[in-house]
Image (cartoon, rainbow, N blue to C red):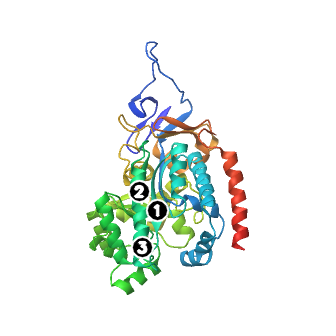
Amino acid sequence: MSIIDGETVIEQGYVVIREGQFQEVRAGDYETNSNTRTHVISGKGKMMIPGLVNTHTHSPMTLLRGWSDDLELERWLSEKIWPAEAQMTEQMSEVGTNLALVEMIRSGTTMFSDMYHLNREGTAKAVEETGMKALLTRGMITMFDSASVASEKLHKAVDYAKRCNASSTRRLKGGLFPHAVYTNRFTFLEDVREAATKEQLPIQLHMSETKKEVADHLRTYGMRPAEHLLTGGILSEGDLLVHAVHVDEDEITLMNDKNVNVSHNPLSNLKLGSGIAPIPHMHRQGVGISLGTDSAASNNTLDIFAEMRQAAMLHKGNLQSAEVISSQEALRMATVNGAKALGFLDSGLIQAGYAADFIMIDTRSAHLQPLTIDPATIVYAAGKCDVSDVYVNGRPLMTNKELLTIDEERVLYDANRARKQLVESSN
């Protein structure tokens, strides 16, 4: 089999996995030793790449796929999504999460970051049961809350994050996610920063997604959102800004100086008409860029292959330069950059000592032939339909396109039933 990650290409090679980690990654053919107990899996006709990482989604909202399309963000949220979410139950949230997990595993995602407000315990349990890795957060919208209610929301979010970090499997991490600067007072964001520092938790939030958001923030505070958050001490090293579509040169410099990361969600930003983030400029400045899908309600899939391809091609056309965002860099955004942004520093590369989080791509399809072994094949030609096997910590979650850790048939049945119930309650 061939092996490709964001740093290395091996046209013909093998890996040895022990105790959930890559012990050896070598070129050539593996020679079995009759004196050792080794389970050998053939990778003939396949490419091995790191598991894909989705650094921003809202998994319960998979139940809202197709609920509302072709609207700009403000109308989409206020007229369609928030009213629907008001009717969602804890059980519906669980069903939506399970549907998201099926979709992500099938499309080669092994790790993701997830924010929502309903049934977060159920989400953590589902991730543990399926064998995936995740950074989970409890979303906070407090703009119209009293100080005591806002404080209670923060307390619950911190408690949830700490329990995720205490997971015995070490496949869960926790963080704090105040929804956005326009849905929380700045004084509350200061409280979030204080709690994050005390408990050593990362902060994530939506930021500068639309021009209106930036204009409103300028009018209210006299500063642009990223400038305000970064000079105001809200964000620090390792925190994650989601979207960052409308940021200027000074803000990008601040982002790099503070070592914050960005989750680039190109398809959601395009579909909602929000704009195109200046990713090539961020990349040149040294800002860490990863990829996210946002929710299936705004995308409408959780397909990191599609985001990876879009991230590589969109900016070439926008800047009329084929040399910006190479296929190798797009692959890094979808793998090792994402793992680093979520705090899983031992994942995202196929190298000795790294966690054995990887997927296999079946190359025996017309759209991948004649086969070229390089990142461009992964980014520009391969897709989720080519994923045959998915492993996390060396444990198979899918082999030969058969899901092993979740009942797909049951999940699809539950999802359609829950969607029908949501439609009825919304009417």
Residue under the image location 32 percent in, 76 percent down: 228
Compared across the picture, whether 339 is left or right of 309 comes to left
Q: Which residue is mark 1?
A: 138
The reply to whether residue 373 is visible in this rendering is no
Distance CA(mark 2)–CA(mark 1): 8 Å
Q: Secondary structure at mark 3?
A: helix
Query: Mark 1 or mark 2, which is nearer the start of the sequence?
Result: 1
Q: Position of residue 187 (x, y in %)?
A: 34, 77
Residue 125, numbered circle: none
The residue under label 2 is which amino acid type?
A: Ala
Say whether marks 2 and 1 touch (CB < 8 Å).
yes
Residue under label 3: 150
**Nearer the observer, 282 or 221:** 221
Q: Is residue 191 left or right of residue 12?
A: left
As measured in the structure, the alpha-carbon distance from the residue carrying label 2 to the one carrying label 3 is 17 Å
> Can the viewer see residue 375?
yes
Q: CA distance from mark 3 to mark 1?
A: 13 Å
| Quadrant in which residue 249 is drawn | bottom left
Mark 2 lies on a secondary structure that is helix
Dot 2 crowding, Cα within 10 Å, few <14, some 14–19, many 20+: many
Q: Which residue is mark 2?
A: 161
Q: Residue 261: percent from the left, percent from the top?
A: 36, 60
Q: In terms of image quadrants, where is residue 42?
A: top right
